[in-house]
Image (cartoon, grey):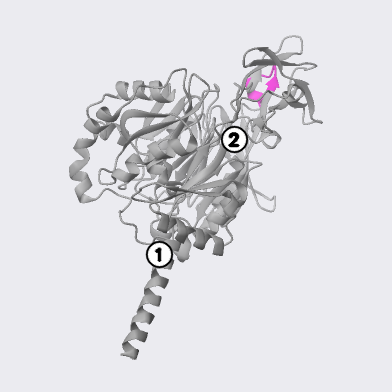
Amino acid sequence: MKKNIVLVGLLCLVNCFVFAQSELYDLQPAFPHRLTAEEQLLMHTLPEKAARNATVAPQGPVAALAEFQPMMGVMIRYSLGIPVSLVAQLSQLTQVKVLVGSSYLQNAASSKFSQNGVNMSNVEFWVIPNDSYWTRDYGPWFIIDGNDQVAVIDFTYNRPQRPNDDASLQYVAQHLNMNLYEMPMVHTGGNYMTDGYGTAASTQLVIEENPTESVASLRQMAQEYLGINNYMFIDDPMDDYIYHIDCWGKFLGVDKVLVAQVPTSDYRYADYEAAAAVFANATTPWGNHYQVYRVFEPGTGSLATPYTNSLILNDHVFVPIAGSQWDDDAIAVYQQAMPGYTIVPVMQANATPWDNTDALHCRTHELADKGMLYVKHYPLLGAQEVQNGTVALTAEIKALSGQLLVTDSVLVYYRINHGAWQHTSLTSVGGSAFEASVSGLQDLDTVDYYLFAKDMSGRREYHPYIGAADPHRFVVNAPTAILNQSMEAPVLLYPNPAVDRFTLRGENLTSVKVYNAMGQFVAEYPLQNIATVINCKDWPAGVYYLSILMNNSTIVSKKVVKL
């Protein structure tokens, strides 16, 4: 009898250990990320549900908030879909709001977090029924409404057997003390990205899942509820079950986008290049062309790490990695595209690879700062005509905290021809409108600048978000031919890394000289006007630097990695 008692006790200890491990990281969630067979049969019921649950649209004008705008925290779910070490990292930087389905799970999470270095003073548990850890897919979209209040936009989640996930935002909005608006659209967060200036992008999945709506009516809904006036529906190049844009693309800024790249031998290669070309040929809300950055995501399985499936959280970017040879290149692309940000590589828990259709972005969700210092500005970029050596800058600045702006701390910082930084005041011209003038400019001067504002709540904000590390830039009275290459990438290079060939694409290209990592001349090639394929099959593997001549006068530098 005593042996049986001991055996039962040991079994209990083992079961407790296994449960504790599963609560540390949910290796086998109750639902798959993909649609279940039962959900596929129920999809036809969702459009009617979306129409039935709809609320009135928020009072306009409405502005959707981008992931890279000011955030007060991040929302995750327990049991975890991310490593507990990442929870610890996040808790050192910001507030971490944790969805738990019961007080029992809250106690388990609290114990686990405390044992693993989580800053518990920055953790808040929200006891909200939920079905899964994909907070990105059912989580909140944020707007600023016509009353200058941050609000939550909900939608009908495209997973019909997960009612708790779909209903969770009414409770999330209550915890955030924000108004909630239900948009009559079937959607999912992984298939939506916005730039904060009225542009959004999704794959064609949103059209397929709303068969009772036309493309025009979907765009009208997005305009009314989200303030989106340019909704891009893009063919999904991934050819997998998920059809989420965050598995292959990501807005890194208003005029920057990251698009995945696959080897030329991959049957989807042309589709990925077509997706990149959609952005390369589009005009941003700032009037320039997108700077399209490419990140190499080769193969399948453990090699197919979805580097685009990252989390931007204020001045940090958390990037999923797999311990593969491509990780360093991916981090380098983020560093190039987002200077001044802290790029944090994140390994999957339990030494398992991230899924190429389900990674870090899918399992986290940033939370907008309700009292943010909102700065909106349409920057001067490229060649600018300047009269009498003076340019005028305008901005919209709102302290949503309700606090006053610090009047001597609303400024434009600028430098001319990479000289010392100077500043001048942004002056209120009524309401939230501000103006400033930068004088003393001469023809062909290169001007870098950024805006800065501070309010009495202690919030400090820059435009662009990262400030001096990546300022706006324009050239005074400059012919287009001599624009500085870093203003907007005038030449596209893809794929990069390259296996046996790559393409240089741009207008008025003349020639390119190639140098190896030692600075030694390798070759020179003539270029066609629009696109030229360079055969690099015989080049030794390594890093090469390209000096590209445009219009017989402008030198543009590029770097390519030969595999």
Residue 479 is covered by the magenta coloring: yes
517 or 276: nearer the viewer: 276
The residue labelled by disc 2 is: 511
Q: Are marks 1 and 2 in contact (CB under 8 Å)?
A: no
Figure quadrant of the N terminus? bottom left
For numbered disc 1, what is the local secondary structure?
helix
Q: Sequence-wise, which precedes: disc 1 or disc 2?
A: 1
Residue 445, percent across and down? 75, 22
Q: Which residue is mark 1?
A: 22
The image quarter containing residue 376 is: top right
Task: Give the residue furthest to the top.
Answer: 388
**At 54% across and 59% down in the image, what residue appears?**
85
Task: Tell me the amino acid under the disc marked 2.
Answer: Ser
Question: Where does the image place residue 477, in percent across and percent down from the top left?
Answer: 70, 16
Q: Is residue 2 left or right of residue 304?
A: left
* Amino acid at dot 1: Ser
Magenta-tinted stretch = 475-484
In the image, residue 365 above or below residue 26: above
